[in-house]
Amino acid sequence: MESPPLEPGDEALARRAADGDESAFEALVARFQGRVYRLACRLTGSEGEAEDVLQETFLQAYRGLPTFRSEARFATWLYRIATNAALMQNRRRDRRPTEPLEEYAPRFDADGRHALQEAELALAARADEIIDRQRLAEQARAGIERLPEIYRTAFVLRDLEEMPTAEVAAVLGIDAAAVRQRVHRARMMLRGFLSHLVGVEP
Amino acid sequence: MTTLTCRDGAALLMDYLEGVLPADTRTAIDAHLSICPRCVEFVRAYRATPRILRESTAFEIPAGLEESLRRFLAGRRGPRS
């Protein structure tokens, strides 16, 4: 049996594309367009705007390829362009002011114990069983939208796109401890938000 | 080290789950979890939160996306900076 031909790596394709090989660039587009589109959807919360971000990302990537340094991962470099394009898109949009999620942080008593009982704390983990699928989909988008931007961006990359913390750090140009701190804040708020959705005020 | 409260443990959860805490802090959290059912449930919900939000915000890739991106890029590639 013949083994399948080995696919060239992302960085090898990027070097060829930087040298003017159009088919190498097209291969990179084919490989990454779905992931970039999904990331853009999650960062902007809108399919229509995600398409603009997708186009802008690959246009910038095409023009910037000669500056791509092959010691970096191509994916990380591309996600950085996509993330910045999505954030620019969000700033251009006439965003309605949203209520921040700070109110959903967990509450503790004077001794530092959880203010809620065990059974109440347990419910948020079952939000997807308790809440109607359609309503949860709408509320989840709305909840993520309400996160302050620096927490939302880190949370989308780390927890929704499931990138390793070190890669999120490279994409955002911050250290891993800062990524963990931002993702933690987002998870704390969103856990409380899920608790609120299942009828337990966090 | 002094006894850890629920509040202390909650503040360290991300670092705990990513395995970047010093051994003594990790041991203190494990000890607290072994006697605190509220924290056990809190950790369960904290860990479930990313999965629930990920699964409920799945986006479909529209059928014409590849073609419209190709047309967009074909018209604009031009000279590089």
Image (cartoon, helix red, strand yellow):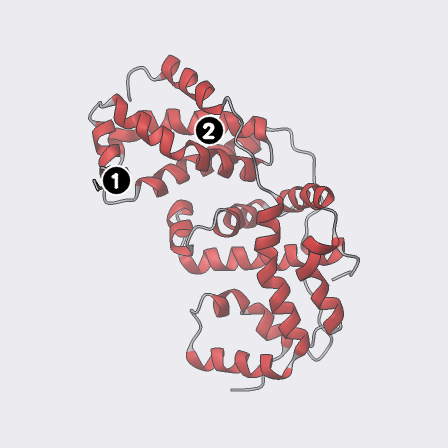
Residue sitting at x 60%, y 59% = B48
Pinpoint residue A96: horizontal percent, then vertical percent: 69, 34
Q: Is residue A115 visible?
A: no
- Looking at this view, is B65 or B22 the one in front? B65
Question: Do callouts 1 and 2 point to residues on the same chain?
Answer: yes
Q: Which residue is mark 2?
A: A54
* Badge number at residue A106: none
Q: Is residue B5 above or below residue A174?
A: below
Q: Quadrant of the C terminus of chain B?
A: top left
Q: Is residue A97 above or below residue B6?
A: above
**Residue A20 appears left or right of B63:** left
| Badge nearest the viewer, 1 or 2 | 1
Amino acid bearing label 2: Leu
Pinpoint residue A45: horizontal percent, then vertical percent: 60, 36
- Point out the tag, 1 or 2, that comes first from the N-terminus: 1
For mark 1, give the secondary structure: loop
Which image quadrant is residue A120 in? bottom right
The subunit letter for the residue under badge 2 reads A
Which image quadrant is residue A42 in? top right
The subunit letter for the residue under badge 1 reads A
Q: Is residue A71 visible?
A: yes
Residue sitting at x 46%, y 28% = A54
Q: Residue furthest front?
A: A1
**Residue A194 appears left or right of A184:** right
Marks 1/2: CA distance?
A: 22 Å
Q: Which residue is mark 1?
A: A9
Residue sitting at x 66%, y 70% = B41
Amino acid bearing label 1: Gly
Residue sitting at x 50%, y 37% = A38
Q: Is residue B21 above or below residue A156?
A: below
